Image: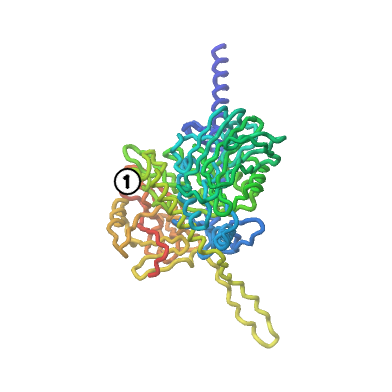
Amino acid sequence: MNYNKNVVVFTIVTTIILLAYSLLAAFFPSYSLGLDNINIVSDVLKPAQIDSTKLADTTAMPAPGVAGVDQPIAPRDINLYLKNKVITAFYTDNSLCALPALMSKLEQLKKTGKGKVRIAWLGDSFIEGDQLTKTVRQRLQAYFGGNGVGFVPITSVTVDGFRSTVSQKWSGDWVEENFKNKETSAPLFLSGRVYHTGSGTFTLKDFTLGKDSTQRLEKSLICGRVASPFSITVNGAARQVAAPARLNRILLDSSTAHNIELAIANNAVPVYGVSMEPKNGVVVDNFSFRGISGEELGRLDTGFLQAIQQANNYDLVVLEYGVNVLYRPDNTDFKWHQRNMMKILPKLRAAMPNAEFLVISTSDRGFRYGDVAKTAVGVDNLVKTQAELAYSNSMAFFNMFASMGGAGTIVRWADSTPVLAGHDYVHPNGRGAEILGNIFFDAFMQDYGKVGNKPKPMASPAPAAVAQPTVAPAAVVPTVATTPAQGYKTTSYGSVIDKRTGLEWMVAGDRDMSWTQALRWADSLKVDKATWKLPTANELMTLYDTTATAGQGYTHTDGKVYPAHINKAFGKIGHSAWVWTGYEIDSAKALTVNLSIGKRVKTEKKGAAYPVRVFVVRKTEQSSK
């Protein structure tokens, strides 16, 4: 009897533990500890997912917007996220500016030399130490004017000297609260941090100006509300200051000096950091926080975000996350992240209505699969998820993964001479970060060149024919809708260019090939002296269009014919709907895409019961053949 009772108690306790773990893993996957196979509610709790096929439309929609600023209304297409080295607002009209309010303000700054443009760049360890942002800041300030490193927090997780743009030193009893704390005594800043001290000192030296002793720098303390005036010491001199607002910017010094020394002896002061910036020009603030996914931004207080905008007035907020979302080698499904961020991004937009937002995708991220280091199998899916988040929240998007070279880049960089990345296959070193910064700056300036462009007039439906007493009604010519099917062009050498994505395609023809044969065919193709490759699944899915058919279709054993739902320009697909991708699943299988139903399929490399065709692809922005 006691034995049976013990079994019942054990069973109940075990079930409760499993249920608690499963619910935790379902709603907070980063705490799943890699034990997904024991999740007992995984088939019940399925997070909502944005259907990208429903996003791939050409509905006329406003741009990523700023309150009070007229935005272009023009057709958009989610598949434009695949374009590399381009900041996109997903407009099918690529002459339109993706960040019109920001670029207009920069145009005025360039003309007058007056005013300040602020950029908040939020990210994880990928931008730690001012990596990447250093190059972007330097080039923006050189072109539009300005100087100074911008915001710097009190402490750093890296040793002094790792960040080449500043030297920061602190001493005393500084206490930091941040994203990792369950509760904080004061609202967190965009840096994800707040500090308190009863006897702390902080020394900051700005290296961005080099030996230039003519540029004036404004050094300001950024802090929260304090009930009454308090004492601080600046460069050895004591003074009384007041901080009555939720966020305060207290000017400490305005001179050509590149350094500041600050002492605070009041635990009631919520200290965020010090900013070193110009009176006029561009300010780029680096807000890096190691090990986060971006979901932590949900902890920022909405009212405090509004106070930040009133005091700092950011014109652009950059969100660059991803490498910590892809934290396991086999991660391919990011619906949980998408669901969580869909709660956070609208909150940020609503709290900062005067700012435009730019989502930068994850960079290339690698793992070791057996003895071989390769790009993570889920990178394509994560980039697509991030693009869908940007599209759905009317934010601009930049595909960092594609822009840096796509799959295999981070491994090549780690093994290159000179070395451009670490062998963690995540972080570029200083050289690699400079390359990425220059790539982004060039895309930024390309968008700046579009400032002031207006949408092309959209065709209006012809008016209905009006019957006349003695004259037959005039024929009404229907307006032709802008659809993906109209966005293709065939070249003189037989390729097909997708004008929406900038991808150029070649089809091997209506014949079967194994995956190995497909690879060889791609390597041997020398058409237009270009380098061609097997496509990714996401690239193939940009061709999927349920309103179109190509080729004769695959005849099933039941006699039904299943055509490929792609544009008729790809008629060489012939009697099939399956196409090889370049993704190898294991030694026996590779991935195909069934373009009849728009699904990814694991397929035997040596061939399957169904016919598989070969498409190859390359990126092109301006082919006109």
Q: Residue at x 37, y 40 (%)?
A: 422
Q: Position of residue 139 (x, y in %)?
A: 47, 54
Q: Position of residue 497 (x, y in %)?
A: 41, 64
Which one is nearer the viewer's eye here, 255 or 331? 255
Which one is nearer the viewer's eye here, 363 or 44? 363
Q: Residue at x 34, y 44 (%)?
A: 419
> Does residue 581 sit above or below 268 in this rendering?
below
Q: Which residue is mark 1?
A: 418
Q: Position of residue 451 (x, y in %)?
A: 55, 63
Q: Left or right: where does residue 597 sit relative to residue 54?
A: left
Q: Position of residue 138 (x, y in %)?
A: 47, 51
Residue reaching furthest bottom? 470
Q: Quadrant of the C terminus?
A: bottom left
Which one is nearer the viewer's eye here, 281 or 185? 281
Q: How crowded is the residue under tag 1: few (<14 C-alpha within 10 Å), some, or many (20+)?
A: few
> Does residue 7 sit above or below 496 in this rendering?
above
> Does residue 579 sit above or below 427 in this rendering?
below
